[in-house]
């Protein structure tokens, strides 16, 4: 009989994911910057009392940027193993992965500006 769900395998998978998260936090400065930006966005969200829909957008942006940064890191590390020496095609792959993070980050920044700037302006104008 084949088990459809193995709790032990699932827990191991979560353990591996946590190890990966620890690794990226320790080794990647950009990921730590994204964490800081995410914390600032969350604190601003509480302070400015954003709506539930805005919370969904903010949290989605934070997770998208962090996920993209982790994928970028994974691609870069794999490229370094495949080709430790400089290779033009590997450079292109790394640049594309970095560009993906940039695009997601710009989208998150624009979303944050749309949500937060009007509220900040309102807060300042009522001072």
Image (cartoon, rainbow, N blue to C red):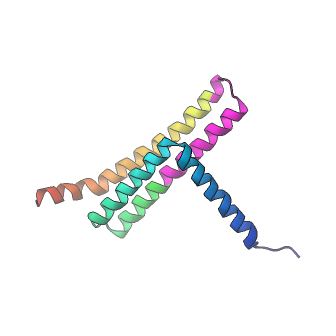
Q: Quadrant of the N terminus?
A: bottom right
Q: Give the left or right position of residue 58, taking residue 78 as reference.
A: left
For residue 91, what is the image quadrant?
Answer: top right
Residue furthest toward the front?
26
Residue drawn at the location 58% of the way across and 42% of the way down: 73
Residue 78 part of the magenta-drawn span: yes
Q: Give the left or right position of residue 78, taking residue 36 as reference.
A: right
Residue drawn at the location 30% of the way across and 57% of the way down: 115
| 1 to 100, vertically: above or below | below
How many numbered discs sit on the rendered protein? 0
Residue 103 part of the magenta-drawn span: no
Residue 75 at x, y = what percent? 63, 40
For residue 125, what is the image quadrant?
Answer: bottom left
Residue 87 at x, y = what percent? 66, 23
Front one among 30 and 51? 30
| 118 to 72, vertically: above or below | below
Front one among 43 and 96? 43
Residue furthest toward the right?
1
Residue 56 at x, y = what percent? 42, 64
The secondary structure making up most of the magenta span is helix
Q: Quadrant of the C terminus?
A: bottom left
Q: Give the left or right position of residue 69, taking residue 17 as reference.
A: left
Residue drawn at the location 17% of the way across and 59% of the way down: 122
Residue drawn at the location 69% of the way across and 67% of the way down: 11
| 103 to 88, vertically: above or below | below
Front one among 76 and 116? 76
For residue 79, what is the image quadrant?
Answer: top right
Front one among 18 and 48? 18
| Image: magenta residue range | 64-90
Residue furthest toward the bottom?
1
């Amino acid at each position: 009989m084949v088990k459809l769900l193995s709790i032990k395998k699932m827990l191991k998978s979560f353990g591996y994911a946590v190890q990966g998260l620890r690794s990226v936090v320790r080794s990647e400065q950009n990921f730590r910057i994204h964490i800081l930006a995410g914390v600032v966005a969350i604190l601003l969200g509480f302070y400015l009392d954003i709506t539930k829909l805005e919370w969904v957008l903010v949290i989605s942006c934070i997770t998208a940027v962090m996920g993209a940064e982790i994928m970028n890191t994974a691609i870069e590390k794999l490229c370094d193993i495949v080709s430790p020496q400089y290779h033009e095609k590997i450079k292109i792959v790394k640049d594309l992965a970095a560009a993906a993070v940039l695009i997601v980050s710009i989208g998150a920044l624009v979303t944050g500006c749309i949500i937060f700037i009007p509220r900040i302006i309102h807060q300042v104008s009522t001072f």
